[in-house]
């Protein structure tokens, strides 16, 4: 009887853990979404000072943002260029640094994507 109770408790605990994992994996947190939208808006502003301030506020690294953030379906550098923000696009390009050959199969790349509408 004691073994049956332990098995039942283990199954219930595993089920509760799995349900909480699925609910947190469904979407990003409000903080993360806000950080990404603000970062995309700062990149679109064509002000490197605004971009740097936003990245500092959310404690984001320029290289990580340049390589991993997608704004409205475009990487952040292309997004900035397409919105006429050439200064911020160039700044983000410079943050990537020198090119190198990397085995993509051996690395895990994380990409954060956000879509938003700019109000007039």
Image (tube, rainbow, N blue to C red):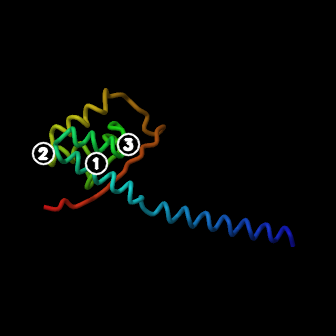
Q: Which of labels 3 and 1 is toward the front? A: 3
Q: Position of residue 101 (x, y in %)?
A: 38, 29
> Relative to 11, is 47 above or below?
above
Spatial CA distance of label 3 from label 1 is: 11 Å
User: For residue 78, which quarter of the picture?
Assistant: top left
- Residue wearing tag 3: 59
Q: Nearer the viewer, residue 100 or 51?
A: 51
Label 2 sits on residue: 84
Q: Residue at x 31, y 40 (%)?
A: 66
Q: In this picture, is 50 found above or below 98?
A: below
What mark, if any, has residue 39 been given in the picture? 1
Q: Which mark is residue 78?
A: none
Q: Position of residue 92 (x, y in %)?
A: 26, 37
Check disc 3: other Cα within 10 Å, few if <14, some if 14-19, many if 20+.
few
For the C terminus, the image quarter is bottom left
Q: Secondary structure at mark 3?
A: loop
Expressed as whole percent of the image width and height from the top left, the position of residue 45 reads 17, 46
Q: Residues within 10 Å of mark 2 (few under 14, many from 20)?
A: some
Tell me how far mark 2 sits from mark 1, CA to CA: 16 Å
Q: Residue furthest bottom?
A: 1
Q: Check disc 2 and report its element: helix, strand or loop.
A: loop
- Residue at 42% x, 38% y: name it: 104
Dot 1, how many residues are within 10 Å of its Cα: few (below 14), some (14-19), or many (20+)? Answer: many
CA gap, disc 2 to disc 3? Answer: 26 Å
> Would you identify the image quadrant in which residue 94 lies?
top left
């Amino acid at each position: 009887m004691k073994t049956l109770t332990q098995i039942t408790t283990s199954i219930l605990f595993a089920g509760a853990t799995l349900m909480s994992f699925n609910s947190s994996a469904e979407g990003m947190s409000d903080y993360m979404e806000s950080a990404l939208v603000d970062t995309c808006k700062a990149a679109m502003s064509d002000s490197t000072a605004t971009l740097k301030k936003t990245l500092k506020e959310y404690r984001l690294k320029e290289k990580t943002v340049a390589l991993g953030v997608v704004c409205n379906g475009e990487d952040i550098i292309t997004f900035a260029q397409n919105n006429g923000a050439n200064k911020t696009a160039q700044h983000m390009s410079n943050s990537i640094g020198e090119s190198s050959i990397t085995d993509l199969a051996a690395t895990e790349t994380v990409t954060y994507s956000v879509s938003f509408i700019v109000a007039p």
